[in-house]
Image: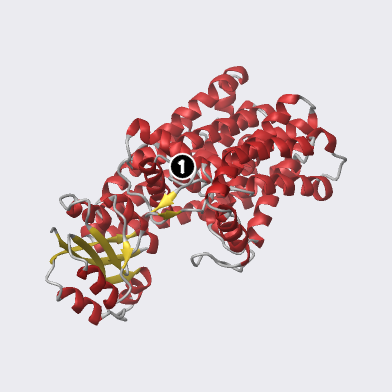
Amino acid sequence: MTTAEQLAGVGDDRLRRWGPWWLALVALIVLLPGNGSIPLIDRDEPRFAQATREMIQRDDWVIPYFNGDYRFDKPILIYWLMRGAYAVFGVNEFAARLPAVICAVALVVITCRIGARWFSPVTGFAAGFGLLTCVQMLMHGRSAVADMPMVVCVLLAQFALWELLQEPAPRWWWLLWVAVGVGFLAKGPVVVVVPVLTLVLYRWVLWRQPVPWRRLRLGWGLVLALVIVGAWGVPALVRTHGDFFRVGIGQHVVKRGFASFQGHGAVAPYYYFATALLSLFPWIAFAGDGVRVTRQNWNAKNAFLVSWVAGTYLLFTVYLTKLPHYVLPAFPALFLLLGQTCRVDFQSARRSAVWFWIVCGLGLFVATASVVVAVVQGEHWFLPGLAVACIVTAVTAVAVFWRAGWLRATLGAVMALSIGIAALGTAARSLLPTIEIARLTQDLPASTKCGAWQFNEPSLVFYTARQWEPVRNVESLQLMLAAGGPCLLVAQERETKLDDLWKQWRGRPARRPVDAPMLAALESTGLERRDVAGLNIARASWIKLRVYYRAQ
């Protein structure tokens, strides 16, 4: 019996009513474990988490700050959501990630309900379950960043847009434009551009049928959205003399489209198709079946979904700054397409089966490699390596068991996945050097001056709850020490990146230059010293730090 037949046996009415609630429960089981132990991943998570803390310290609801300076990267919504979580759970990793988890649960539930409304309860459940258990959602569904609220708003806007084109009901118009306004507060113009591209591709490329444009009431809709945005945007622009727009939109939106930001640039037009192998794993294994089913069941809804996916991928393909999660707004549509494969006879398509087992084989290869790394490297890497192997194996098993129709085994794999994530959080926490530095700073007075040389990761600010200044050279070091009083200096002595390990395995020693004069100057200060080593997650490197401090 296939998974679809088992779900159908529940009954359409019962699955339609209880399916979203079951998915919400599974989502909480998958997304909550480890959130309080997995350290904030540099660089974005600590910036958002610390900016919210600084807003609270300043009693400011309008302007985010990080390390004492303006933070213009994103609009205000995520900071408000984190502030609410901090009020209940305190300032910690769990609270910082809670808004993303709640939004991810909402995303899965709404996707399930849309699938049930547009296709069938079985398709809706399959779409929501697949969305929840793909790798990109497992990561960003718990990340303390602005993406999840934005993706929820895009999903609601697209849902309302389709329904409004079918039925001129006021509720769809209000949902569309409120979602656009709130979505802009989450992450800017993407919530506008994605629906526009979807409509263009749907009307003139993929379906090519007349669209009742008047139902959108574009003028009044934009007014409503602008009122929502302006309630925060106008005070923010006034207080920063327009810098929030010039920097937030001009640099962090427009400029990123024409220039690589922080090295996240990729010219290759196939970038997002290549990264889909990881982002959509393990459900990318069903891609062949998804294409076949979509072609066989080509209709207006599927044309709209394909337009949604194509528009999102087109937008971020021409956008020069690229990261795998940028295309997350397309994921609900992708899984609503893939969810229709749940009724497919998988045994009838040999090519699809070959692709399926190739993808699953890659997953098992990665799991095996993680075990090898854990055993060979040992020490710090043993538990993290085993945890990663458990996670990858569990995710692969989810797809295999789902395809085989073993629903109970699929749920068992989900539980194993949850355990693996919790174990990874426990193992990873001991590897973050900034947590150890934070322990060293607990007994230092609040007036301590803090400086960092060659190590300026945002997690340093969050975990120590102090402002940090960069130490650029020996002269700036001397100026800082000359001021007297308590001080704390963090200096990076050595860094070993993944390519260095690769060179070592090939018998080619990798050496990175060390600034000997700077280290000598630090040693001559007479400050107390501690050595700290750990993983710099943002750079995927192992680092050795020297921590110098003076308590008075």
Q: Residue at x 63, y 61 (%)?
A: 319
Colouring rule applied to residues = secondary structure
The answer to whether residue 241 is above or below residue 15 is: below
Residue 462 placement (x, y as % from top left): 33, 50
The residue carrying pointer 1 sits among few (fewer than 14), some (14 to 19) or many (20 or more) residues within 10 Å by Cα, namely many
Q: Does residue 198 appear to the left or right of 330 in the view shown?
A: right
Q: Is residue 541 left or right of residue 271?
A: left
Using the image, determine if residue 486 lies above or below residue 115: below
> Quick check: can you spot residue 162?
yes
Residue 148 lies, in percent from the top left, at 52, 42
Q: Is residue 349 visible?
A: no
Tag 1: residue type? Tyr
Residue 51 at x, y percent in the picture: 41, 48
Q: Quadrant of the C terminus?
A: bottom left
Q: Is residue 484 left or right of residue 511?
A: left
Nearer to the camera, 423 or 69: 69
Q: What secondary structure is found at the residue carrying circle 1?
A: helix
Mark 1 highlights which residue? 79
Residue 178 image-quadrant placement: top right
Q: Nearer the viewer, residue 496 or 186?
A: 186
Q: In the figure, residue 403 lies in which quadrant? A: top right
Q: Position of residue 329 (x, y in %)?
A: 60, 46
Using the rendered view, name the quadrant where residue 243 is placed. bottom right
Which quarter shows the N terminus? Answer: top right
